[in-house]
Amino acid sequence: MKRGCLSHVLFGALLLLLFGGSTYFSFTYFVKGRSLPTPNLIGRSVSDARRITQDLGIDLQVDEAHRRNDDKVPVGNIVWQNRTPGATSFIKRGSTMRVELSAGPLVLHVPDLAGASAGTAILRLGQQNLKPGDVTYVGSDKVGVLAADPPAPTVVAPQSAVALLVGIAPPAPEYVMPDLIDRPVDRVRPALEARGLHVSTVKYEAYPGIADGTIIRQYPLRGAPVSTQDPISIVVSRQEEGGFAPVAPVAPAEPAPPATTQ
């Protein structure tokens, strides 16, 4: 009984060995035997590459629509192929190899960034394979990039740093908000506006015992910082409450000293 089982095992192993050997032989003879190691065409001229591929029975397809920059491969020579070269990479006769040609070294110029914002200038440098160097901000009537170092259109290497000088609007003058309470609005408003301060809202409210046209509330409050860019709101007394009134220009009057610069 044991001898019968052993014979069956040996017979199965023999069949497996024969099947594996025939499979390997078939692959080697019918497939690999008709294939060739993929040639390395990188760096060769198109004419040289065509002679090599014709001898091997391979069709060479040159992609004229796309070129690649390369520091080592001369312009017009093959810089890329779609099949990996080498003894372990095979290609069948009658197959097609697609290649692209070199456009030579990549030549980068510093772009003209004059007038661009700092963010836009940094973005454009990144798009050109460059990077921002020191970015210096100065108060200026001209807003945006004033100068670059190196300047446009200097030829530079990839990832070169470009320093930027960026102009920004000078800060608005800042004052200390004065105490406007109990002052007449027809004198205070011209004094504020003469200094560039903007009275954006005037509201009238009835307030017993206070003469018409007298300021009874203000915002910003006394002592707060205020600039020409900040709105000022005031509430003015009137015998009959009438809500908001349009902010109309007021003729200059004798100015009260409402604000002092910090």
Image (tube, rainbow, N blue to C red):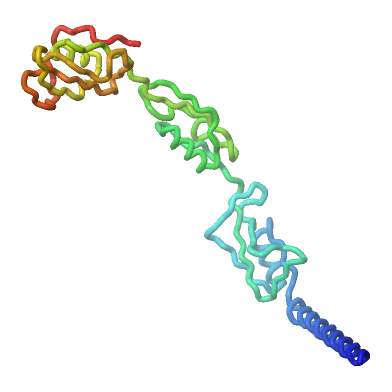
The answer to whether 226 appears left or right of 180 in the picture is right
| Residue furthest front in the image | 208
The answer to whether 221 appears left or right of 68 in the picture is left
Say above or below: 22 vs 232. below
Q: Position of residue 15 (x, y in %)?
A: 83, 87
The residue located at (16%, 15%) in the rendering is 215
Comparing 166 with 209, the one in front is 209
Comparing 242 with 209, the one in front is 209
Comparing 4 with 14, the one in front is 4
Q: How many marks?
A: 0
Q: Quadrant of residue 117?
A: top left
The answer to whether 139 appears left or right of 18 in the picture is left
The residue located at (46%, 27%) in the rendering is 147
Q: Position of residue 198 (x, y in %)?
A: 23, 21
Q: Quadrant of residue 170?
A: top left
Q: Position of residue 95 (x, y in %)?
A: 65, 73
The residue located at (49%, 29%) in the rendering is 164
**Location of the N terminus (image quadrant):** bottom right
Comparing 215 with 85, the one in front is 215
The residue located at (68%, 58%) in the rendering is 42
Q: Position of residue 200 (x, y in %)?
A: 20, 24
Say above or below: 4 vs 230. below
| Residue furthest left in the image | 240
**Location of the C terminus (image quadrant):** top left
Q: Quadrant of residue 140?
A: top left
